[in-house]
Amino acid sequence: MSIKKLPPDYLNESDKVLLSGLLGKALKIKLDDVPSRASVRSVLPNQCFTRQTGKSLLYLTQSILIQLFVVLIGLSLPRTINMFPLWFFYSLISGTTAMGLWVLAHECGHGAFSDNRRLQTTVGYVLHSILLVPYFSWQRSHSVHHAYTNHISDGETHVPLVIDGDGKNEKAGGNEEMASSVFLGKNLYGVTQLVLHLIFGWPAYLLAGKTGGPRYGTSNHFWPVAPFSKKLWPSTWAKKVWLSDWGIIVVISLLIIWSINYGFISMLCIYGAPLLVVNIWLVVYTWLHHTDTDVPHLSGKEFSYMRGAFLSIDRPYGKVLDFLHHSIGSTHVVHHIEPTIPHYHARLATRILRKEYPNAYLFNPTPVHKSLWNVAKNCVAVKKDKNRDRYIWQQP
């Protein structure tokens, strides 16, 4: 992929941008290309906003049955060292199917699962706790992520380092990161970023707020008080963080009992390794939803809720993954605009969005594995546009 200059209307002549499969479209979006939330609601049929508890429970049952079938296969496999290749393959399959349960818990957190709030909260809390996700903590931080998507300082996930960043309104460290990229070379830097993001990214986010914006400091999803920052947990949210912890404590206790009675290797093979794959899928989706070499981050007058939402990127995950993961990767733009739309209405809403707002809607047709590699090795640090309140990925 070669570096191409965009016209002066879109970038300073001195800046370089590496075009993705979006071909610079995100950089060309004008403020009046982005509709109001009311406008989007007016073109979507009422059925898109209807939550059907029975239908949601049916999809939940589907994901549970698929996962039970996979686990039963795992329980029949010998847990010996010579079977490691088969267990590696099993972990990939089991973690991939279990991601469907994560997605449904995610819907509960948004209020998209059911109008029965008690049922919805119970389902989300149980599912996320089983996956070692602190439900209410994540619900709060994720709502902030939605409110400030691609905001350079107030964004809550995958906020980039800024070249010459001031460390207060921007994340400092961009200069050093660019130097690291040059020193390691594109390919080694890309491999390093894949390992850091996919293996360590999710726990680092939960434990220390890594990739979050500078506004929130060093947050911890399990400990909402000092020595960690309290900024992410206002009002009663700190109490909800503690409540989330009880679900995690119960599940960890059960895992310890499992290990004592049936062996640590059994727990690791059936639960631990697949959970790592679930976390990898989570990072892949979130990273690629909001990052590409020609997708800007915003501040000041350039930012609005709808502008940030329309910087989300839909991608082609294919029929199998869309089935297992309830289309979370191919309908994410509309999810950011109206997060209470259930996944079973999101495809219709996405088709309407794509037709009605072609200048603002983003879909990158590049195969996901190629996009992931492009982002890992080329999205190093951003630099502020001299003429506008936006930040653009730079190439060495």
Image (spheres, rainbow, N blue to C red):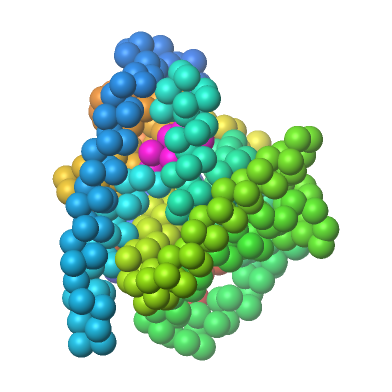
Looking at the image, which residue is at 56% across and 76% down? 178
Main secondary structure of the magenta stretch = helix
**Residue 359, horizontal then vertical, whole percent:** 36, 33
**Residue 352, horizontal then vertical, whole percent:** 28, 23
Q: Quadrant of residue 261?
A: bottom left
Relative depth, front residue between 14 and 189: 189
> From this viewpoint, is residue 275 visible?
yes
> From this viewpoint, is residue 15 visible?
no
- Residue 68, compared with residue 114, is above or below; it is below
Direction front: furthest residue: 261
- Indicate whether residue 386 is drawn in magenta: no
Q: Quadrant of residue 5?
A: bottom left
Relative depth, front residue between 50 and 177: 50
Looking at the image, which residue is at 69% across and 66% down? 172
Q: Which part of the image, by quadrant, shows the N terminus?
A: bottom left
Relative depth, front residue between 357 and 215: 215
- Indicate whether residue 104 is drawn in magenta: yes
Looking at the image, which residue is at 34% across and 19% down? 52
**Residue 361, horizontal then vertical, whole percent:** 36, 35
- Residue 193, compared with residue 287, is above or below; it is below
- Residue 275, compared with residue 334, is above or below; it is below
- State which region is magenta: 103-110
Looking at the image, which residue is at 31% across and 36% down? 60
Does 41 sit left or right of 300 as displayed?
left
